[in-house]
Amino acid sequence: MVEKLSVVKFGGSSVRDSFWSALELVDYLLEGSRLVVVVSALRGVTEKLLELSERPEWELFESIALEHSRIADKLGAEVKPLLDELEKAIKENRHDPEWKDYILSFGERFSAVLFAKALENEGIPTIPIDAREILTLRGSFGNAEIDFSASLPRVRKLGELAEKAVPVVTGFIGNLNGKTATLGRGGSDYTASALGAMLDAKGVLIMSDVKGIYTADPRLVPEARLIHFLSRERALLAAKLGMKALHPRTIEPLGSIPLILGRTEDWRLGTLVSDFGDDWPIIVHRVEGERARISIVGVEELPGWKGVKGNGYFSIAVEREELVPALREIHGVVFDEDPRSCHHSELWARV
């Protein structure tokens, strides 16, 4: 019987700032499982490529080329063919959605080559996989969706490949009618969950520079607390209402497959999204022009606050400049004790 595999996705900060921790984590995970790796572009590179697609200037190209060439030289990786392809592409200077997605695809394509070479240098058999070869998309450029039925035969071959080597797959991109298209916000997470679903993985890990999902955005609410166990239903509702940690499309394909979020730097696993979870509310927000909407998932009324009661949440509209004070005040009202703590070994047991 072939053992089940795990899918692990490394975000841009992991690929750039916690590179060696990511490599060590892959080596560790291989001790008990077959593995498929999904990588994002290096942190900041997608933004540079987006700017390059809007104003194809030589200085921007040189900055991107230098950043990847430095890493490639240290690893002994070959990125010149990709750089030549990118240089040729920007000379077209087309500015249409198809061309823009093509330019944006280079970030993940560089990362896959670099990460695969780094694994090879550590003695781990590996192969970089361009997701355009396995993922068929539908919809429109800039926010395409994965066509699961059309992609499944090629993805299954990826699972067979994982018996002999570690596939390092480009996140965020796929094949739309023979053209390169991107999956939009959270696209690399979506790639990982889609592969996990089609390969019937025993777990999908999303590794980044944060531990997991918090009771509110910790960048705006310092008192926000880590939620260790979160139900899939509540995570999906929070994502639809504005939670930044996960996009709804990352959660939807997985069914009963556990989704685990953790921090690459120290391998700390923080949140398990599964069929069951603690009943802790999540405070999310969405900015809408000069207004902002705060939603408390898991609470249907909040004493002293006027708002709209939804199915499983309570929503409040505030002025944009009032967002942060309101978030902090609401968090203080909703939470008067800590969510159940756990040792992260409890989460490792699900990988």
Image (cartoon, helix red, strand yellow):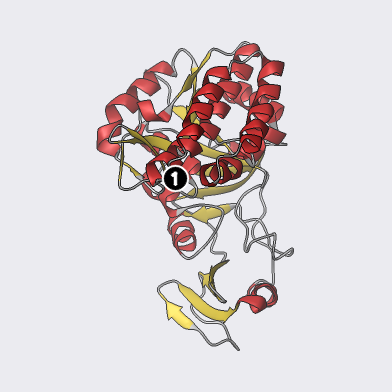
Expressed as whole percent of the image width and height from the top left, the position of residue 13 reads 66, 39
Please determine whether, in this image, residue 275 is positioned above or below residue 280: above
Extreme-left residue of the structure = 149
Q: In which quarter of the view is residue 318 placed? A: bottom right
Residue 193 seen anywhere in this rendered image of the structure? no
Expressed as whole percent of the image width and height from the top left, the position of residue 324 reads 68, 72
Expressed as whole percent of the image width and height from the top left, the position of residue 64 reads 63, 33
Q: Quadrant of the C terminus?
A: top right
Q: Quadrant of the N terminus?
A: top left
Please determine whether, in this image, residue 217 is positioned above or below residue 265: below
Q: Is residue 36 left or right of residue 255?
A: right
Q: Residue at x 44, y 80 (%)?
A: 309
Q: Residue at x 43, y 58 (%)?
A: 233
Name the one closer to the observer, 80 or 318.
Answer: 80
Name the one closer to the observer, 17 or 295.
Answer: 17
Expressed as whole percent of the image width and height from the top left, the position of residue 159 reads 39, 23
Q: Amino acid at mark 1?
A: His
Residue 127 seen anywhere in this rendered image of the structure? yes
Residue placed under numbered mark 1 in the picture: 95
